[in-house]
Image (cartoon, rainbow, N blue to C red):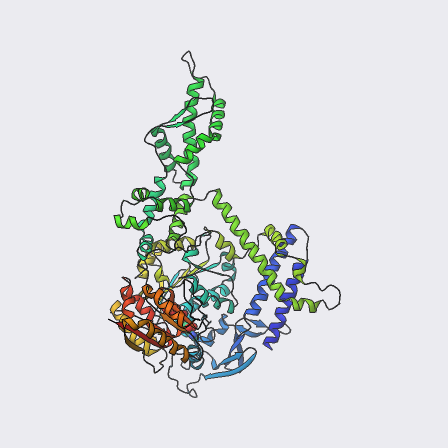
Amino acid sequence: MLYHRLDGLREQASRRLGEELRTTGGTLQARSQRDSAVRMYADQVEQFSAVENGLCFGRLDTDGDGRHYIGRIGIFDTTGDYDPLLIDWRAPAARAFYLATAANPQGVRRRRHLRTRQRKVVGINDEVLDLATASPTAHEELTGEAALLAALTAGRTGRMRDIVETIQAEQDRIIRADLPGVLVVQGGPGTGKTAVALHRAAYLLYTHRRELSSRGVLLVGPNATFLRYISQVLPALAETGVLLRTQADLFPGVSARRVESAEAAALKGREVMVDVLAAAVRDRQWVPDEPLEIEQPQREILLLDPDTVRAARDRARRSDRPHNLARALFDVEIVHALAAQVAERIGADPLGGENLLDEADLAEIRRELREDPEVRATLDQLWPVLTPQRLLADLYADPDRIAVAAPMLTDAERALLHREPGGWTPADVPLLDEAAELLGEDDRAAEARRERIRAFQREYAEGVLEIARGSRSIDVEDEADGGEILGVTDLIDADRLLERQEEAEHLTTAQRAAADRGWAFGHVIVDEAQELSPMAWRLLMRRCPSRSMTIVGDVAQTGALAGTASWAEALEPYVAQRWRLEELTVSYRTPAEIMAAAADVLAEIDPALRPPRSVRSTGVPPTDRAVPAGRLAAELVDAARREVADLTDGRLGIIVPAARMDDLGAALTGALPEAALGADPDLESRTVVLTVAQAKGLEFDSVLLVDPDGIAAESPRGRNDLYVALTRATQRLTILRPTP
Ligand SMILES: Nc1ncnc2c1ncn2[C@@H]1O[C@H](COP(=O)(O)OP(=O)(O)OP(=O)(O)O)[C@@H](O)[C@H]1O
């Protein structure tokens, strides 16, 4: 019945989408309304398709014979009293599904988990929440234990799945926490932090739709591979409005793919860079040592002396405007001084009286000077209008500029900043953003933003037509009168839709936000937040002036040298003590046997830290094997072959020290051609070879960990890296330890 209703809803939305796309003409207002309707129906078609799998996954039988079905979206009975046929998991009425226990049943008699494959129910699990009749379970604190354990032990696919069916009480509390303020979620590996962050985004959009749909929600993750790994979770929850970004993509127009040393990235993450950049900008406000000559057509050469330039510079600086915006003031000062010189020459009274030029003459001289190419070139030289990219590229390329801007750094640190132009690194992004603040926006930046918006509009227009094309069979059936059977896409193409879009600027919030550096998001969620440097925090805080944020991470897993070891240190500059901490304490990923091995490493990081409790054990302890160093590659290939043969479904992750990636990676791909590796490996392949930095946040059924001591020795935060590597497996862990 529910699927029948879903089909009806989808058909209705797609028919309306088709109708809206076919109508043309009308007043500006009518066209604008039609474009909003196109967006709405396109979103609906997408949403109704996205919730197809597992549409309904639960049932609550309540006291007094109530029966409620819980699912991915709400569906109402539009024929009768508008009764809910399916309750959205985010609605308050669904909450008991996640919280009711035998000890506190909240009016629930029975909780049923439904397992479906396509549109068939293939299994059910019932829990009777009545202390008298309930059968005792191993874990009293778990809700829906059987369904949970089935989800946890299922083979991995290389894509993260949503957990709406089995959210646990401690996770539910965080997902549904209030919108305002900064909420930090600290939890060990596998405690569901990422899952909770994503479900919280969906919950907030549902509960605070009005507020958030116009401001948007930004979710920041550690790298592109990770974003791809989690990218299906929100659409499966019927939410497409969240902007997913890595730090590398947070400066509109820049895609930071260049690689640099961990030390250089760490230096760029330090707060001292605020002063370095401010000094770099001041250094571009140049005062010459000697008077500058400005040639004038049919006039004598004008001279601009250092004192005049200095006075103009100081006045422009005192305005406290950003560099590019203060340029106008600087120009006025300089042009005034030059005009006085010209007036002195051409208007001097030969009889020694007052200057013969009046104010109108002077204004004319100033106008001419402002338009004079020589004068403009001089002004550009003294106070150039700069883009953030120009400022930073010029600074990095020139050791002299670095020396002037960064006297507080050591020689070795300054050397880390020096490099040739050509692309940006992720650590450059917060610096570009900082520079943009210091420089202010000029016309070129605004023009670049318009360009980016146009690109998004085109992408959007194509997307809408794609959806319309996908629903074409329904279109055709609808035209059963035998007349016109042209589909929508025969009648309108992306260019025409784009023209219409331009009139109304109907972009999604996420698209507009992505194009605009100054966008203020309604809520910002940061995953693996321990990796952020102080400079990156500054950027994020700028994007979220309301400080409504969810910050998710584990300070024991910090790998970045400029990352954080303390939430208080990272946050207090922005919100003082006004942040709340929630902790997740149960590991859903890592079995007890593997967690025990990881606990030893955690104790070395900080004896005060406690590993999370595992919800399950596999009975299979990790295998830890010493192999002669010379045979490491051969042994690794053998072990990988064995593991792949043992996997029925699921994935094998092979984690190697970064320094051994090239040789071990080559050996592995030689023997197992399907093995994926590289900068952004395909996680859906059966075997993936990665470094710890790449494996962060990911999980595999089986993990082969190569040379743990080598990994620990690779970085000052090597123990944290090893802890991350040890906690990636859901079933089996094999360690290969080379010996001399
Ligand atoms: N309530 C739940 N029901 C089913 N699966 C869950 C639940 N909570 C967590 N999981 C699963 O546990 C695994 C780990 O979750 P997740 O990746 O969110 O943990 P994490 O805390 O972000 O880990 P890390 O610190 O390693 O990044 C995932 O496969 C997730 O789907």
- Seen in the image, is 456 located left or right of residue 478? left
627 left or right of 356 in image: left
Q: Which part of the image, by quadrant, shows the C terminus?
A: bottom left
- In the image, what residue occupies the spot 29% across and 70% down? 708
| Residue 509 to residue 738: above or below | above
Does 200 sit above or below residue 65? above
Q: Nearer the viewer, residue 99 or 65?
A: 99
Query: Residue 473 placed where, x, y %?
Result: 66, 68
Q: Position of residue 410 (x, y in %)?
A: 25, 48
> Residue 261 falls in which quadrant of the image?
bottom left
Q: Is residue 554 visible?
A: no
**Residue in the foreground of this view, choosing between 625 and 296:** 625
Q: Quadrant of the N terminus?
A: bottom right
Quadrant of the rendered image containing residue 132: bottom left
Circle count: 0
Q: Quadrant of ligand 1?
A: bottom left
- What is the residue that sits farthest to the top in this orientation? 351
Q: Position of residue 677 (x, y in %)?
A: 41, 66
**Camera-nearest residue between 163 and 59:** 163
Is 378 or 344 nearer to us in this picture? 378
x, y (%) of residue 726? Answer: 33, 72
Residue 401 seen in render: yes
